[in-house]
Amino acid sequence: MDRLAAQIAFLDEADRLKSVLRAGTLHDRSRAENSAEHSWHVMLYALTLAEHATRPVDITRVLRMLLLHDLVEIDAGDAPIHGDHDPAAQEAAERAAADRIFGLLPPDQAAGYRALWDEFEAAESDDAIFAKAIDRVQPVIGNLRTEGGTWPEYNVTQEMLEARVGAKVRRGAPALWAHLSGEIASWFRGRS
């Protein structure tokens, strides 16, 4: 297969991300958000909120990571952070999906995209730490805008939210988590 044909095959496959539904809804609650919409929205979050990163980031690299980060859901599906699933099995499914999906590309692009995806997953570089924080905070804001969204369904407690999400957001954008903490606490107090 020539280079252009391989690139188009990858782009055709990426279109399938539009069909992967997430647990959360749009802010107007009209329907479930899909993973492609989530990827676009977290990119906009990152572009808008980059000044709040713990350390300076290369926003172009962050955007590239966020554009690619959920393509694996084409094969592995979306695993809500508070859902009941085996994290090790999900990680293995996502790695296999990354092999297959990025493997559709010409080798140089496949290697570059996979390296960015791996960097995002490892969350060790400043760019990946910030990207991971933004990926975690967007659903929180969605849940806050939809009267708790999926939190009641998943029996989420404030402690669970802090441990599974807050720690990652604080690591990459502490001012953002500090800003949301009052609203989060207020929502949980209202449920008591």
Image (cartoon, helix red, strand yellow):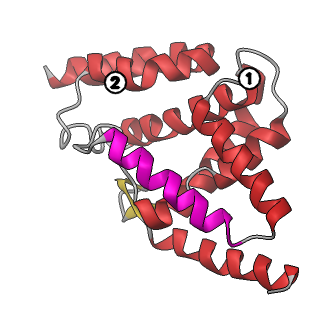
Q: In this view, does 26 lie to the left or right of 187?
A: right
At 71% from the left and 21% from the top, the residue drawn is 53
According to the image, label 2 marks what residue? 161
Q: In this view, does 94 lie to the left or right of 118?
A: left
At 58% from the left and 37% from the top, the residue drawn is 121
Q: In which quarter of the image is residue 102?
A: bottom right
Q: Where is residue 24 in the image (x, y as percent from the top left)?
A: 36, 51
Q: Where is residue 180 in the image (x, y as percent from the top left)?
A: 48, 21
Q: Where is residue 9 in the image (x, y as percent from the top left)?
A: 70, 82
| Amino acid on which the number 1 mark rests in the picture | Asp
Residue 110 magenta: no
Image quadrant containing the N terminus: bottom right
Which residues are drawn in magenta? 87-104
Q: Where is residue 132 in the image (x, y as percent from the top left)?
A: 59, 33
In the displayed structure, would residue 159 be above or below residue 64?
Answer: above
Q: Quadrant of residue 52?
A: top right
Tag 1's secondary structure?
Answer: helix
Image quadrant containing the C terminus: top left
Q: Earlier in the sequence, mark 2 or mark 1?
A: 1
Q: In this view, does 138 lie to the left or right of 84?
A: right
According to the image, label 1 marks what residue? 126
Q: In which quarter of the image is residue 124?
A: top right
Instruction: Judge the density around disc 1: few (<14), some (14-19), many (≥20) Cα neighbours within 10 Å.
Output: some
| Amino acid on which the number 2 mark rests in the picture | Leu
Query: In the depicted view, which residue is nearer to us: 181 or 94?
Result: 94
